[in-house]
Image (cartoon, rainbow, N blue to C red):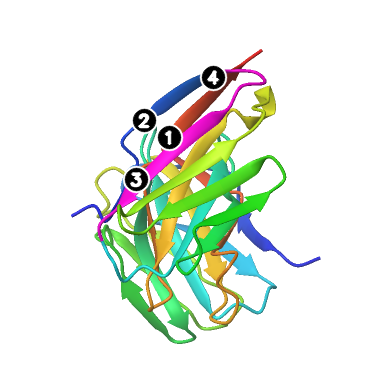
Amino acid sequence: DGGITQSPKYLFRKEGQNVTLSCEQNLNHDAMYWYRQDPGQGLRLIYYSQIVNDFQKGDIAEGYSVSREKKESFPLTVTSAQKNPTAFYLCASSSWVVRGYGYTFGSGTRLTVV
Amino acid sequence: DQQVKQNSPSLSVQEGRISILNCDYTNSMFDYFLWYKKYPAEGPTFLISISSIKDKNEDGRFTVFLNKSAKHLSLHIVPSQPGDSAVYFCAAFNAGNMLTFGGGTRLMVKP
């Protein structure tokens, strides 16, 4: 059963700590994306990767870092430089070939800074 | 520069009536349009899409209309059900395979 898995679902971080959010897909999709959603807001693009070993900054990349060493995995690190990291984070993937369904999203990780 | 806009942040509809969600775009290079549905604390799920060469696509209770001359997209839900209460995002693909999302419209269907 193909899909995209984000873990953990809830994450608490102390101020000043880095934390890594996991995103794994078994859909054989080439592209992967990270979005952030704040309460009552839309989706803002943090980083995206169209192919392995390559990624691009989105609209709000400051304070975040990513890697794409494997096609299936696109972890996001929220660094201590991110001033307001408390948010709901969504990972997505897509196929270059099948565009009609757009992106497939994971179920999200809610990060809270304590 | 918001290329995809959903001007109504919320919409309230009575159960059984029609829900109409609207979306405007500015980029004439968009070639595919999609609607997503999102419940709180969950990821968005794909609802329906339409190619720019069509003006209507229907799937059960959901119909998407595209007016290219007006650069306007709408989603019709008939009849509306309480389970349809969610945030709806419209999105558009450019040739580079990147989706641009609107800000979302919260639909509330009252029993």
Q: Is residue A61 visible?
A: yes
Mark 1 and mark 2 in contact? Answer it, CB < 8 Å.
Answer: yes
- Is residue A11 in the magenta section? no
Nearer to us: label 2 or label 4: 4
Give the letter of the chain under mark 4. B
Query: According to the image, label 4 marks what residue?
Result: B13
Which amino acid lies under the numbered mark 4 shown in the image of this protein? Answer: Val
Q: CA distance from mark 1 to mark 4?
A: 13 Å
**Element class at badge 3:** loop
Residue sticking out furthest to the right: A1
Of pointers 1 and 2, the one earlier in the residue sequence: 2
Tag 3 residue: A85
Could you classify mark 2 by the number of other residues whose Cα lies within 10 Å: few (under 14), some (14-19), or many (20 or more)?
some
Q: How many numbered markers are drawn?
A: 4
Residue drawn where x is 57% and y is 63% of the image: A23
**Number of the label disc, if any, that sits on residue A113:** none
